[in-house]
Amino acid sequence: MPLALLALAVGAFGIGTTEFVMMGLLPDVADDLHISIPSAGHLVSAYALGVVIGAPLLAALTARMSRRTVLIALMALFVAGNALSAFAPGNASLLAARFLSGLPHGAFFGVGAVVATAMVPPERKARSVSLMFLGLTVANIAGVPAATLMGQHLGWRATFLAVSAIGLAAIASLALLIPRDHAPAPTAGLRGELAALRSLPVWLALGTTVAGFGALFAAYSYVTPMLTDTAGYAETSVTLLLALFGVGATAGNLLGGRLADHSLRATLFGGLASLVLVLFLFPLLMRAEWSAALAVALLGMAAFVTGSPLQLMVMEKASAAPSLASSANQAAFNLANAGGAWLGGLALSAGFGTTSPAPAGALLAVLGLGVAGVAYGVDRRRAVAHGGRVVAAHVPSAVETPSHR
């Protein structure tokens, strides 16, 4: 695989670290800024809002620019947002800086996925996307725990300075390793990118992302009380168990990329089906410490097996203009985060028990399977209408390089 994928992974590592580290720093930030924990929690929401707004907006605004230039500019915006977070004098300015930090998140992954697939032959496209996402999953194993410890010992501002340094390293890597001929300006332009979003298959693919990863976050958002109240773990053990989730996610991401290169649809359906099974078994697995640890790892693996297939499916459906749709898929991931957490909270509020968010998430995964099935049916009808047949999903020629056409 091209060394240039390392540059994308470094950027993904920085983004993954800054996205999730705030959860561990909330008490320190709240104490330093003299605000309550719930008020500090708005800093998490501000970042997510930046992702949802920034993903399609920045992808649209940069539709005529070289993708290499876009990636470098997005990472520069990321560095600026984190540096401003480090020096924010108060809660309002920190909220604005966190929103700014979230703006480039979705567009970076969206455009990065298009660039990653352009650097490899067709039979390795899913693996190229999974290697970019590897930076995100490894951030949950190493980046977030290390950044949290740094914040606890050196102050939370030091954490955001360190993340800014990672961003600068990513900029240098992108400039040195991304070949200009593999990331030219798109030919479709803004009009073509917007036209791609008017396609029903694109929206069905985005809907599959929202339902599939919403299932994950319905359970994962409340996994700490499940581990402490049901499985009997001490609170001090939770950080290590969450690292197990990162290990499972990393393994699932790499496995999904390899399998999707052989059959995208089979990998997607298989991943969603395994997620349904894991979530339905979650309450049973939480009854013992050993099985609870296994459940956390399996949850990460089952969910992230679908990551690369979902990204490629959206790019496939967007056909000649994949950049905007690919970025919109990242906004869909964050909508899944918010929607899944909301659904899991409803199950808890209804009094169904500490582990009830997991079966609620399983129902969302079933919905994701249904939407994916509808998308497959639409593909079959269109293929029949054109006298063709349904074949293995393939990222369109718009994201291929001349050497691979």
Image: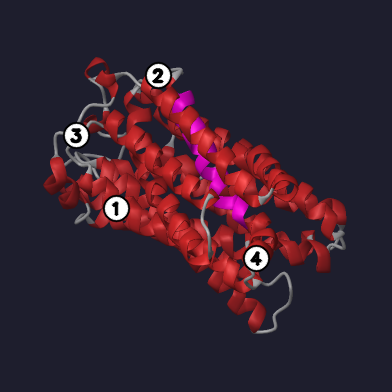
- Foreground mark, 2 or 4, reads 4
List the residue tagged with mark 3: 186
Instruction: Mark 3 or mark 4: name the one nearer the start of the chain.
Output: 4
List the residue tagged with mark 1: 56
Which residue occupies the foreground of this view, 88 or 11?
88
Instruction: Mark 2 or mark 4: name the one nearer the start of the chain.
Output: 4
| 3D distance between C-alphas at marks 1 and 4 | 32 Å
Q: Which mark is residue 362?
A: none
Residue at 42% across / 44% down in the picture? 80
- Foreground mark, 1 or 4, reads 4
Q: Is residue 67 above or below residue 91?
A: above
Report whether 252 appears left or right of 317.
Answer: right
- Under circle 2, the secondary element is helix
Report whether 117 appears left or right of 294.
Answer: left
Residue at 34% across / 58% down in the picture? 53
Instruction: Mark 2 or mark 1: name the one nearer the start of the chain.
Output: 1
- Tag 1 near tag 4, CB within 8 Å: no
Residue 334: tell me if it is visible. no
Residue that protrudes farthest toward the top in the picture: 403
Instruction: Mark 1 or mark 4: name the one nearer the start of the chain.
Output: 4
- Tag 3 near tag 1, CB within 8 Å: no
Q: Is residue 20 magenta?
A: yes
Which residue occupies the foreground of this view, 78 or 211?
78
The three-letter code of the residue at mark 1 reads: Pro
Q: Which percent across, then down, holds residue 312? A: 37, 40
List the residue tagged with mark 2: 177
Q: Which residues are magenta?
A: 5-22
Residue that protrudes farthest toward the left in the picture: 191
- Tag 2 near tag 1, CB within 8 Å: no
